[in-house]
Amino acid sequence: MRFSVLLPVLLLAAPLVLLAGCKKEAPAPQPSASPTVAASAAATPPPAPAGQARKVDESNDSYEFEYAYPAAADAIPALKARLEADLVKQRAKLATEAQEAMAEAKQNGYPYHPHSFSVDWKVVTDLPNWLSLSTIVATYEGGAHPNYHHDALLWDKAKGAQVAALDLFTGKQALSSALRKDFCAALDRQREKKRQEPLKPGDMFTDCLDPLDYTVILGSAGHQGFDRIGVLVPPYEAGPYAEGAYEVTLPVTAKILALVKPEYRASFAAGR
């Protein structure tokens, strides 16, 4: 049971290029452009040697395993080591759980459907000091359908370390407040488009959500700094499973820039 078959509509690769400058179906209203941020004062590391995209694809009677990451990640030794360690960990976990499930199915006389795990890291944006990645983590454990959620990875090239996107800001509550109005307006536009009818107050899946309860990714359309914030919402949160994931892209506004920690301010730019 391959994920390429199970999720042809849901995956769409949209969250993987969400912030790379492509137009979205339902972006928030765009503010007037403000001056871009000056170039980072921090020392920019020299260009990394070219990497090579990596993909592992295994299939047997008990499980199907896919794990991939791009050349941009392979070119950073510390990040490559982290991803390789995760690859080994996830494959071992899948193999163990699949063998246990297969044995249980045989013991109880019911059919066994191979378990699956799939990750394909994609570049959101690649800046001189930062590499922003995102992926869909898709799993199948023998149920009615596969499940999936989003994940993100932000790599500080100058420090050689992973950094949580929200750690670049002074406070989660303040950032949530700065994003929430535009986020919920964009989310509702997407809901109406998918449902092909206006939202009705009181119906299921019409509530406004806290954007920071979900996966946040940073991207850049202008390639001068982070000028986009993406919020990736999995199924069952903003709508029923059949509607798939919701992906909202918002520009970095002056209000958001004011919430960036001083040491990261030079890595951001105003969004258009």
Image (cartoon, helix red, strand yellow):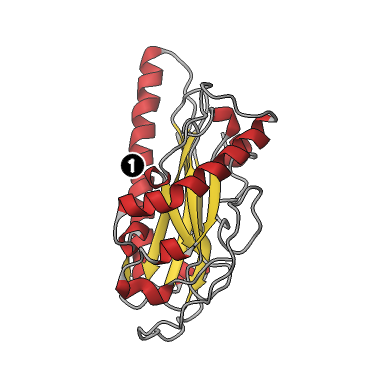
Picture quadrant where residue 33 is located: bottom right
Q: Position of residue 146 (x, y in %)?
A: 50, 32
Q: Is residue 67 visible?
A: no
Position of 192 with respect to 38 (left or right) is right
Q: Position of residue 127 (x, y in %)?
A: 48, 74
Q: Residue 120 or 166: which is nearer the viewer?
A: 166
Q: Which residue is mark 1?
A: 93
Crowding around mark 1 (Cα neighbors within 10 Å: few <14, some 14 to 19, many 20+) is few
View extreme (top): residue:
109
Q: Position of residue 136 (x, y in %)?
A: 49, 47
Give the answer, above or below, for where 126 lies relative to 135. below
Q: Is residue 103 visible?
A: yes
Give the answer, above or below, for where 57 lies relative to 79. above
The number of callouts visible is: 1
Picture quadrant where residue 267 is located: bottom left
Q: Residue 24 or 258: which is nearer the viewer?
A: 258
State which quarter of the image contains the C terminus.
bottom right
Q: Position of residue 115 (x, y in %)?
A: 45, 33
Q: Residue 261 or 119: which is nearer the viewer?
A: 261
Position of 74 with respect to 23 (left or right) is left
Looking at the image, which residue is at 34% across and 78% down? 158
> In terms of secondary structure, where does tag 1 sit?
helix
State which quarter of the image contains the N terminus.
top right
Name the residue type under label 1: Lys
Looking at the image, which residue is at 59% across and 66% down? 32
